[in-house]
Amino acid sequence: MTKARLSFLVLCLFVSTVVPGQASRPATGAANKSWQSFWTQFSRAMNKKDLVALRSMMSDDFTDNGGGATASDWVKGLNDAAIWRDHKASVASGTRPFKYEGRPTRITKDEDYHQLIFVFGKDGHWRWAAMMGD
C-alpha cells in the first residue's frame, strides 16, 4: 500500500472516531412534525402557570445553568412572579433551531434574561431540557 493511501486510511479512521454523528433524518423529521404540538402545549402550560403540566414536559436531567436543582425542585421555585414574567416573555419570543449534542434542539429567541432549551429525546418526545443565561 502506498504511503498516501495508508495516510488516507489512518485519517479516515481518526475522523470517524473524533467527529460526532449528526441526528438522523428520521429523528429530525419526527422532531419537526411534533414540535408545533409540543410548543402549543408548553406555551399554554406556561401561560396558565400549570406546574404539573410543565414538570411533565421537562427532562429529568434538567439543567438550570449550573444551579444544581432537580427538575421537580426547579418547578417548585416557579412561584415567584418575576420568574413567571420572564418565562412568559421568553416563550413569547418564539424559538429557533439550536445545535446541542447532535440532537434536534430548539432555544427561545429571548436574550435579555435567559433562554429555554428544548431537546427532542431518543424516546421521540420533546422535553424542556435546560435554561441558559443570567
Image (tube, helix red, strand yellow):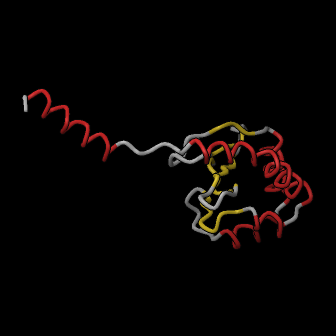
Q: Position of residue 38 (x, y in %)?
A: 79, 52
Q: Is residue 132 left or right of residue 21?
A: right
At x 62%, y 63%, the residue is: 62
How many numbered callouts? 0
At x 32%, y 43%, the residue is: 16
At x 75%, y 62%, the residue is: 57
Which image quadrant for residue 69? bottom right
Quadrant location of the N terminus in the rendered image: top left
At x 58%, y 41%, the residue is: 25
Residue 127 in view, yes or no: no
Vertical placement of 31 versus 81: above or below?
A: above
Q: Is residue 85 left or right of residue 35?
A: right
8 and 37: which one is in front? 8
Q: Position of residue 14 (x, y in %)?
A: 25, 42
Residue 67 in view, yes or no: yes
Q: Residue at the front extreme?
A: 1
Q: Residue at the right extreme?
A: 48
Q: Residue at the left extreme?
A: 2
Q: Position of residue 13 (x, y in %)?
A: 24, 42
Q: Position of residue 129 (x, y in %)?
A: 64, 57
70 and 106: which one is in front? 106
80 and 62: which one is in front? 62
Vertical placement of 75 versus 134: above or below?
A: below
